[in-house]
Image (cartoon, rainbow, N blue to C red):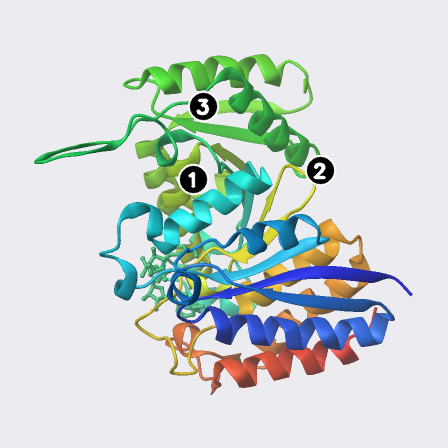
Amino acid sequence: MNSYKIALIKGDGIGPEIIEEAVKVLDAVAACEGFDLEYTELLMGGSAYDITGDPLPDETIEVSMNSDAVLFGAIGGEKWDKLPREKRPESGLLRFRKALGVYSNLRPAIVYDELINASSLKPEIVKGVDLMVVRELIGGIYFGEPKGREGDRAFNTMVYTRDEVVRIAHSAFKIAMERSRRVVSIDKANVLDVSQLWREVVEEVALEYPEVMLTHMYVDNAAMQLIRNPKQFDVMLTGNIFGDILSDEASMLSGSIGLLPSASVGNKIGVYEPIHGSAPDIAGQGIANPIATISSASMMLRYAFGEVVAADRIDNAIKQALAEGYRTKDISQFDAVELCSTNEMGSIIANYAAKCKR
Ligand code: NAD
């Protein structure tokens, strides 16, 4: 029997609630498909700081490195916002990604037909949207030096090296080869030197993928085009901060940030996590949408473990739950629906996943 070791990081806010549902669904498909999942719970974020004084204890890195994959909820919250930067939950997450070398963050944005009315855009604009943001994750302005604050002056630095751009560009082109072979590289090359290097290097890498059509777009235009005509996009290749912002924007095409998964890969161990944060405004109320995390768990089965049938079971179960009219609060506004809690949505999907045909 195949057995996989999962480092489980619940984090803060809604993190524990959504991870619990993902585990429920994972256990259901593992039982059906006959493989074993071994979870090790690890601390990160504000909850880790409260217990250990560090938002990223060494044990979390060590055990994660010795696992087959990391399933991650979310970190952060107002309670920890006033701490010195290195003690803040977000610093822990950035250090974690750097330590694992997960430089490529894959963020699919798919509009489910069943949720066509949940988007704030017109159905004819969003129907059929299926795009992938490939975001560089461990470079750029979130990591660049120097950074700091000197009284009333504060600064961060956007830095990219050739090697960093080369590897993320390869990641995007490889994914494009499995999709419709179109890459739009997003930058601000009309203003930023770092974007001029980015563009130059992406064009060089593109020569190795003659079947892929590469175009460039300024980030401000991309923000507008995503709303105007999102179907023009297939793979969007971006730096760290541009991808952070554009993928949140893309999430609204689908109706809610609570729907979209992500995979952060690059080195040996991948991190699978929803694109949203810890949503402190709804934590503990049982209304968070667990679908983004359940879908991230499906990406983990597919990409980290090669358990494609089990992943298909989960993806089909999510579609079935939505088709049957089950909705958490965030996606309930526009349809006649069966409103359900975080816990109920997890159980419904687990149930369907266990019954779904292979
Ligand atoms: P957020 O993504 O947590 O929330 C934005 C909005 O979306 C909120 O109104 C929230 O209620 C809603 N939302 C998010 N996830 C949802 C879900 N699953 N179901 C229903 N609604 C959902 O972003 P924010 O409010 O800007 O940040 C809150 C905290 O999360 C901050 O401390 C921030 O630093 C942190 N954060 C963490 C991550 C991460 O862990 N990867 C990512 C982004 C933000």
In front: 285, or 183?
A: 285
Q: Disc 1 on helix, strand or loop?
A: helix
Which numbered dot is residue 178?
Answer: 2
Which numbered dot is residue 243?
Answer: 1
The percent position of residue 73, horizontal first and vertical second, equals: 51, 63
Q: Is residue 352 left or right of residue 336?
A: right
- Classed neighbour count for the residue bearing mark 2: other residues with Cα under 10 Å, few (<14), some (14–19), many (≥20): few
Quarter occupied by residue 203: top right
Q: Disc 2 on helix, strand or loop?
A: loop
Residue drawn at x 52%, y 43% is: 97
Would you place residue 36 above or below residue 206 in this image?
below
Are dots 2 and 3 in contact, CB under 8 Å?
A: no
The percent position of residue 16, horizontal first and vertical second, equals: 50, 73
Amino acid under disc 3: His
Q: Earlier in the sequence, mark 2 or mark 3?
A: 2
Instruction: Name the quadrant of the N terminus.
Output: bottom right
Which numbered dot is residue 73?
Answer: none
C-alpha distance separating marks 1 and 2: 21 Å
- Classed neighbour count for the residue bearing mark 3: other residues with Cα under 10 Å, few (<14), some (14–19), many (≥20): some
The residue carrying mark 3 is 216
Amino acid under disc 2: Glu
